[in-house]
Amino acid sequence: MITWRPRAADDFERLIDVSSAGHTANAARDKSLLENRILQLVRFDQLGRKSRRIGVRELPIEGTPYVVVNRRLEDELLILRIFHTGKATLA
């Protein structure tokens, strides 16, 4: 099961809104990439890298400037935040 912290859900909506302001096709692509990679975390919770915080992992989303910060709590995948790295990406 995936649970979103309210702040993470806000991050997601804000990032997609900002992306869609630039170009709707890019926003749809970024949203799809984020959603697919988050779904993969349910089965493969060791994707990404360890964070400085114990039990927290960071998953960079390839092809985007986004990083999903998450934690596994038994059968629950908790999405803590989604950050924009500020780096340009190749499209």
Image (tube, rainbow, N blue to C red):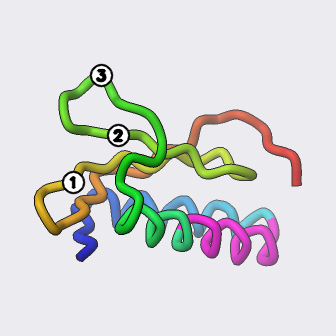
Dominant secondary structure, magenta: helix
In the displayed structure image, the side of residue 34 where residue 1 appears, left or right: left
Quadrant of the rendering where the N terminus is positioned: bottom left
In the displayed structure image, the side of residue 53 where residue 10 appears, left or right: right
Name the spot of residue 56 as percent of width and height, x first. Answer: 26, 38
Q: Is residue 48 above or below residue 61?
A: above
Mark 1: amino acid:
Arg
Query: Quick one: 83 or 59, which is closer to the camera?
Result: 59
Residue at x-position 15% and y-position 68%: 75
Q: Which residues are magenta?
A: 23-34
Instruction: Please report whichever mark, 3 or 1, sits nearer to the chain's N-terminal start.
Output: 3
**Mark 3 nearby-residue class (10 Å; few <14, some 14–19, many ≥20):** few
Q: Which residue is mark 2?
A: 57
Mark 3: amino acid:
Arg
Disc sitting over residue 39 in the figure: none
Instruction: Please report whichever mark, 2 or 1, sits nearer to the chain's N-terminal start.
Output: 2
Q: Farthest residue toward the left?
A: 74
Query: Quick one: 45 or 6, which is closer to the camera?
Result: 45
Residues at marks 2 and 1, CA–CA distance in whole angstroms: 9 Å
Say what secondary structure mark 3 lies in: loop
Residues at marks 3 and 1, CA–CA distance in whole angstroms: 15 Å
Query: Quick one: 79 or 16, which is closer to the camera?
Result: 79
Name the spot of residue 31 as percent of width and height, x first. Answer: 61, 72
Asked whether disc 2 touches disc 1, contact meaning CB atoms under 8 Å apart, the reply is yes
Q: Which residue is mark 1?
A: 72
Residue 62 included in the magenta stretch of the image:
no
Say what secondary structure mark 2 lies in: strand
Q: Which residue is mark 3?
A: 52
Residue at x-position 88% and y-position 55%: 91
